[in-house]
Image: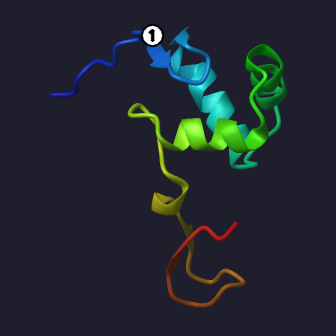
Amino acid sequence: MATQRQDEPWFCPLLKAEIAEGRCLDIQYERHRFMKVGALAAVERWTGASATQVHATCDGCPRLPFRIEDLRIEFPRGSERGSERDARPLDF
């Protein structure tokens, strides 16, 4: 049986406020350069925090949605990376 996801707000130590999980993900995706949505510029403007402070605060957050070192990328068979399934940590 699947459990239902609850859309409860998360307390963000960076913004010192409750935020939606989606806002946290926007910040994390931009922080790791997956996409650019303007979230980091807004956070820096609202808090006065430097990029270094943003990274340190997010990395120490107990609700951090993912850790970059835990992500893996897989290339399917027949890809340009080889004939066998190849899984490696993302290298940024």
Q: Which residue is mark 1?
A: 9
How many numbered marks, from 0 up? 1
Vertical order, 59 against 57 (above or below): below
> 44 or 36: nearer the eye?
44
Crowding at label 1, few (<14), some or many (≥20) Cα neighbours within 10 Å? few
Q: Quadrant of residue 2?
A: top left
> Residue at coordinates 51% horizontally, 88% vertically from top-left?
84
x and y percent of residue 88 in the render?
53, 76
x and y percent of residue 42 in the render?
81, 20
Look at label 1 and name its amino acid: Pro
x and y percent of residue 70 in the render?
45, 60
Considering the numbered disc 1 on the image, is that residue within a helix, a strand or a loop? loop
> Residue at coordinates 84% horizontally, 27% vertically from top-left?
41
Q: Is residue 52 left or right of residue 13?
A: right
x and y percent of residue 37 in the render?
81, 29
> 74 or 11: nearer the eye?
11
Q: Quadrant of residue 48?
A: top right
Q: Quadrant of residue 91?
A: bottom right
